[in-house]
């Protein structure tokens, strides 16, 4: 199962897979960071479709078309804001991964790219977020088989090295 998980450094909007995950805010109407990059790369049609979704709660996920991105779908999820770990942040971040992967299976998606959800302005500690991301993906693989490839796309060296070292702990 672990052989279906890949860590790459680069721009998530350039991933040529079936879907990518957007670390969105609750409005789903774009924002900064990866959310803004995805909206800019997808074009105005993505915003138009997102306006019909009535937002998204933390831990949940919603799906749209990929429009001008090289993917068929964008799965939007809202990660938790870090408040020291006592506000169900781990449970909510776990839900993000489970709900994104479930939507992927429900839409026949076989390959998907994830950013580091909640680790930017939401302040989730990178090492803790990486562990949840990889652990929940492996747990999901143990219960469901159709997803062939999960890529964790890291924007910078620190994220890349943290994801690599975290994945190595599972081998």
Image: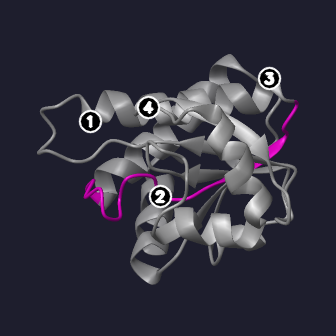
Circle 4: element type: loop
Q: In 3D space, how far apart are the residues under numbered discs 3 and 2 (Cα atoms)?
A: 23 Å
Residue under the image location 58 percent in, 37 percent down: 137
Question: Could you tell me if residue 141 is visible in this image?
Answer: no
Q: Which residues are magenta?
A: 108-125
From the viewer's perspective, tell me whether residue 79 is left or right of residue 22.
Answer: left
Q: Which mark is residue 59?
A: 4
Q: Taking 81 as reference, is 154 above or below it?
A: below
Q: Which residue is mark 1?
A: 89
Residue closer to the observer: 70 or 53: 53
Q: Residue at x 27, y 47 (%)?
A: 81
Q: Position of residue 42 (x, y in %)?
A: 76, 65
Front label number (2 vs 4): 4
Of pointers 2 and 4, the one earlier in the residue sequence: 4
How dense is the environment of label 4, judged by Cα within 10 Å: few (below 14), some, or many (20 and up)?
A: many
Instruction: Name the residue that disc number 2 marks.
Output: 116
Q: Residue at x 47, y 70 (%)?
A: 33
The mark closer to the camera, 4 or 1, is: 4
The answer for how far apart the CA atoms under marks 4 and 3 are is 18 Å
Q: Earlier in the sequence, mark 4 or mark 1?
A: 4
Q: Can residue 92 be seen here? A: yes
Which labelled disc corresponds to residue 108?
none
The chief SS type of the magenta part is: loop
* Apparent side of residue 122 relative to residue 170 in the rendered image (left or right): left
Q: How is the image coloured?
A: one colour
- Secondary structure beneath label 2: loop
Q: Which mark is residue 106?
A: 3
Q: Quadrant of residue 90?
A: top left
| The N terminus: image quadrant | top right
Dots 4, 1 in contact, CB < 8 A = no
Tell me if residue 33 comes above or below residue 10 in the rendering: above
């Amino acid at each position: 199962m672990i052989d279906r998980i890949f860590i790459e450094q680069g721009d998530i909007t350039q991933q040529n897979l079936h879907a990518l995950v957007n670390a969105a805010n609750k409005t789903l109407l774009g924002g900064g960071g990866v959310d803004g990059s995805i909206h800019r790369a997808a074009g105005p049609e993505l915003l138009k479709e997102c306006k019909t979704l009535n937002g998204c709660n933390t831990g949940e996920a919603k799906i749209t078309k990929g429009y001008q991105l090289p993917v068929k779908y964008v799965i939007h999820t809202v990660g938790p804001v870090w408040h020291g770990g006592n506000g169900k942040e781990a449970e909510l971040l776990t839900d993000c991964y489970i709900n994104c992967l479930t939507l992927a299976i429900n839409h026949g998606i076989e390959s998907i790219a994830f950013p580091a959800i909640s680790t930017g302005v939401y302040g989730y500690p990178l090492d803790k977020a990486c562990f949840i991301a990889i652990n929940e993906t492996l747990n999901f693989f143990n219960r469901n088989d159709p997803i062939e490839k999960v890529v964790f796309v890291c924007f910078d060296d620190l994220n890349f090295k943290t994801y690599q070292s975290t994945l190595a702990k599972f081998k």
